[in-house]
Image (cartoon, rainbow, N blue to C red):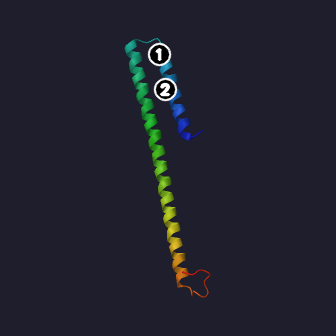
Amino acid sequence: MSTGKVVLGTVAGLAIGGILGILFAPEKGSVTRQQILDKGNDYADDLKSKYNEFADSLAEKIQSGKDFVQEIAANGKAEFDELKKMDHSESKFKL
């Protein structure tokens, strides 16, 4: 199971539990509605925060991958240039 599904399931479970807890509490309707609204906003903020953390982590990994590919490309070009400089009679490759 992916991390995203676990987080989504956890947030959904917390939201449902919070709403059910509020609905069964002996409060006036207006107070209950306000509590539901407040809890909903709390869960939405939490979900946004987790999404932003995930997006930042993903962006860092993508940048790391790009840097790695650029380094490999630069090393490959340097190796290729070195091979070109070699005497073709000593080289196993014909360039």
- Look at the image and tell me in which quarter the N terminus lies: top right
Amino acid type, callout 1: Leu
Q: Is residue 46 left or right of residue 10?
A: left
77 or 56: which is nearer to us? Answer: 77
Q: Residue at the spot x=51%, y=76% of the render? A: 78
Label 2: element kind? helix
Q: Residue at the spot x=37%, y=15% of the render? A: 30
Label 1: element kind? helix
Lower position in the chain sequence, tag 2 or tag 1 = 2
Looking at the picture, does residue 78 appear above or below residue 42? Answer: below
How far is the residue under mark 2 from the one under mark 1? 12 Å
Where residue 31 appears, x then y in whole percent? 39, 16
Q: Is residue 51 left or right of residue 86?
A: left
Q: Which mark is on residue 15?
A: 2
Q: Pointer 1: what residue?
A: 23
Q: Residue at the spot x=53%, y=27% of the render? A: 13
